[in-house]
Amino acid sequence: MATAPATPESPVAALLAALPPGLATADPEALAPHLLDWRGQKRGVAHLLARPRTTAEVVALVRAAHAHGAALVPQGGNTGLVGGSVPEPAPERPTILVSMQRMARIRAVDAAGLCLVAEAGAILAHVHEAAREAGTMFPLSLGAKGSATIGGLVSTNAGGTQVLRHGTMRNLVLGLEAVLPDGTVLDQLTPLRKDTAGYDVKQLLIGAEGTLGIVTAAALRLVPLPAASAVAWVGVADLAAALALLGRLRQAVGERVESFELVPADGLALVLAHLPGARPPLAEPAPLNCLVELTDADAGAPLADRLASALADALAAGEILDGTLAGTGAQAQALWALRESLPVAEKADGPSLKNDVAVAVADVPAFDSAARAAFARAFPGARPLVFGHLGDGNLHWNLRAPAGADASDWLARHGPAARRLLHDTVVGFGGTISAEHGIGTAKAAELARLGDPGRLAAMRAIKAALDPADILNPGKLFA
Ligand SMILES: Cc1cc2nc3c(=O)[nH]c(=O)nc-3n(C[C@H](O)[C@H](O)[C@H](O)COP(=O)(O)OP(=O)(O)OC[C@H]3O[C@@H](n4cnc5c(N)ncnc54)[C@H](O)[C@@H]3O)c2cc1C
């Protein structure tokens, strides 16, 4: 059961009565779509759905939660992949799902100052449009851009396909407005480029997964809109060859390498099967494919020529097997669709174990070989599907059940041990178990098992200091 009824004398009814009229509802039908996560693997439980329109309404929610011992679970687009955006069952405690979707205004775009201020519920694609209309770009993108919100992106410290050049959300937030667990408004929205006046509290909230505050708005760093770009799809034999290509491109064009993404042959096959109208980009399928984008603010930059010449050299050196350059914007978009549709195609194919690991870029081939060998020994027949942000050393090292097995049953029996094996391997290489998706509930036990004890102790101390009543997103991050 996903919701609990609010009887007149119940704590939930008392909480609802204490809130400003129209802010929250106990309607199970309104709540239902917010309680199932994107993976379709986790159904949460909440009593009320609140949809604040202003920062003052968020303050009212936090104060009422204090007075009534309630829990608040912030939610943006509900595209998170680690179970962080849906509430844990807490039978004794009224739980409010706080959807930020009504706070979706773009408050300001300052093209000269390269800054955009958006409310937490603003959808990433809308932010892209607003920045583009002003002749600028917000340089963070990902497959869920049509639903993911600024508040969710801030709270997961999201990455995506342009981290190589522009960094993660942490590098792109100039200022933040948030409601802290005691109802105080953190008013750090001013887009200062420099500020050494004490702790950078806004950075604590970035990546906090809604456990330290409810983000209500963010001042985002923009960059000039690239005037030239070149996109290529390149087939390679293995990861070492892919990294050789990345090195060659960096030598050739420096930081104009904006994206360097990995799509394996089996991932491309899934996309071709599930994406209407998708066509194979190369004449012969390659074991691995790299999607490369170069950009430049100078409209006259001969990027396509330089990319073509670097690829010709790579072909002559035996580093790549084949490649195709997008000749038009539409062709570039079609190549990007092949990469961005991979998570959706994977989901359509059936349940899988989603992972989000990173190692130093140079260690990627050795880590991948070690992980494949370990899995072949421990889980014969299980099928890794490894794709992602190769230029950042960040692989979605996902696992599908052996062909012919009941995937749900296999994952229920072997998923936890498989995840431990992968994480042990990644930690053995000095890597991280979560590069960009966060911890949520899916990886909380693993963080407790493998996280640096000093960092975990500091995290617990910060949580206890800012949110001693554990009002905000209880059960997330910490096992
Ligand atoms: C197809 C697909 C592709 C993806 N690709 C990438 C990728 O390339 N890179 C990447 O980093 N991620 C990726 N993701 C994951 C996901 O899109 C990101 O984690 C995104 O940041 C979540 O945004 P959201 O608005 O949907 O947040 P939600 O899923 O609603 O919430 C995520 C977390 O943030 C918290 N939260 C949400 N809003 C607020 C707020 N206003 N204040 C405080 N806490 C809040 C929630 O409580 C939860 O813990 C992908 C997901 C999908 C489905």
Image (cartoon, grey):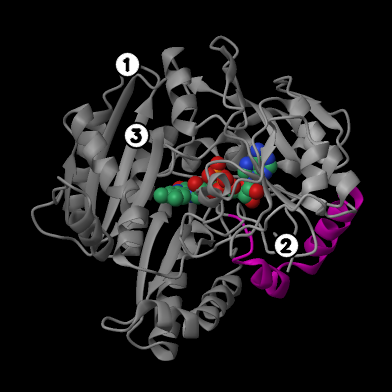
Q: Tell me if residue 173 can be seen.
A: yes
Residue that carries the numbered disc 3 in the rendered image:
294
Q: Quadrant of residue 288?
A: bottom left
Give the label, 2 or 3, closer to the camera: 2
Question: Residue 330 vs residue 345: left or right?
Answer: left
Residue drawn at (62%, 26%) of the image = 119
Q: Secondary structure at mark 3?
A: strand
x then y, percent, for residue 145: 44, 38
Tell me which label, 2 or 1, sits earlier in the chain.
1
Tell me which label, 1 or 3, sits earlier in the chain.
3
Q: Quadrant of residue 105?
A: top right
Majority secondary structure of magenta residues? helix
Q: CA distance from mark 1 to mark 3?
A: 13 Å
442 is within the stretch colored magenta: yes
Residue type for callout 2: Gly
Q: Please provide the residue range marked out in magenta.
A: 438-467
Circle 2 residues within 10 Å: few <14, some 14–19, many ≥20: some
Residue that carries the numbered disc 2 in the rendered image:
475
Residue drawn at (28%, 28%) of the image = 303
Residue that carries the numbered disc 1 in the rendered image:
299
Quadrant location of the N terminus in the rendered image = bottom right
Q: Secondary structure at mark 2?
A: loop
